[in-house]
Amino acid sequence: MSLVKAVTAAVAMGASMAIATPAAAAPPHPFVFVHDTFQPASQADKAGAVTYDKSLVPTSASVFIAELRVGGKGMEHHEGREDHGHHMMHKGTFVFISVRGLAPHHHYGIHVHTKACGTKPDSSGPHYQNKKDPKQPSTNPKYANPHNEVWLDVTTNGAGKGWAKSWEKWQFRSGEARSVVIHKHATGTTQGKAGDAGARVACVNVPFK
């Protein structure tokens, strides 16, 4: 998917610049960029990113998250001659995350959640789902999967750095996606454990479109 590859490259470059220059201005709509350093959970009422486990997400760690909402808001993409003159439009949501300073060589489960971060790990509510599972908490792979949710699992390198991206063929419902939560383990995929990634070790507020 050439559009996603192009956006990945652009966002990755932007992530590097934003982390190096925290004061950089956020790009205009339809992009959302968040860059922050993790603060203690007690500061959740005024911090953009908080940690609940400083051994896995130290207060010196930083995070960059970007969202690109494609289609439905006037963004159009033309495929060129191969579309035989027909107008083409992709519609969906692209989310990118880059982290620095986390525990090295660790696999984190990371997902978009429905509520804002709080002083307690469960303040951020459940995973955002395009089609909501009528049974909560959702552990049914029919609903808890990377096509119905936004999964951004990251395995850090020796310096505690890592990144991930997700492309979904749908868009967030207004006001229902409000944070990105970092979990202790890789995300499960089997019946009864689908979407489960262990304890919530950090949270980042993101004003998703």
Image (cartoon, helix red, strand yellow):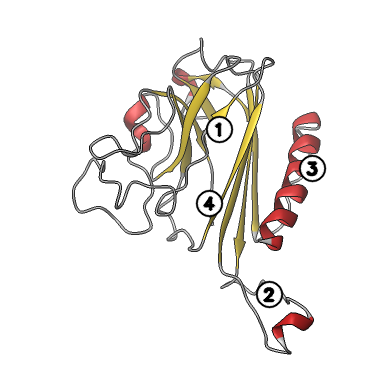
> In whole angstroms, how far apart are the C-alphas of marks 2 and 4?
20 Å
Label 3 or label 4, whichever lies nearer to me, is 3
Whether residue 114 sits left or right of residue 72 in the image: it is left
- Picture disc at residue 208: 4
Q: Helix, strand, or loop for circle 4?
A: loop
Q: Amino acid at mark 2?
A: Glu
Residue depicted at x 29% and y 55%:
132
- Picture disc at residue 76: 2
Residue depicted at x 68% and y 88%:
86
- Comes first in the chain, label 2 or label 3: 3
Give neighbour class at mark 2: few <14, some 14-19, many 20+ (Cα, 10 Å).
Answer: some
Label 1 or label 4, whichever lies nearer to me, is 4
Label 1 or label 3, whichever lies nearer to me, is 3
Q: Helix, strand, or loop for circle 2?
A: loop
Q: Which residue is mark 1?
A: 48
> In whole angstroms, how far apart are the C-alphas of marks 1 and 3?
22 Å
Give neighbour class at mark 1: few <14, some 14-19, many 20+ (Cα, 10 Å).
Answer: many
Taking depth in this image into account, of 18 and 77 the one nearest to the observer is 77
> In whole angstroms, how far apart are the C-alphas of marks 3 and 4?
20 Å
Taking depth in this image into account, of 68 and 77 the one nearest to the observer is 77
Q: Is residue 173 above or below residue 180?
A: below
- Comes first in the chain, label 1 or label 2: 1
Whether residue 116 sits left or right of residue 59 in the image: it is left
Taking depth in this image into account, of 192 and 131 the one nearest to the observer is 192
Q: Amino acid at mark 1?
A: Gly
Q: Position of residue 75 (x, y in %)?
A: 67, 71
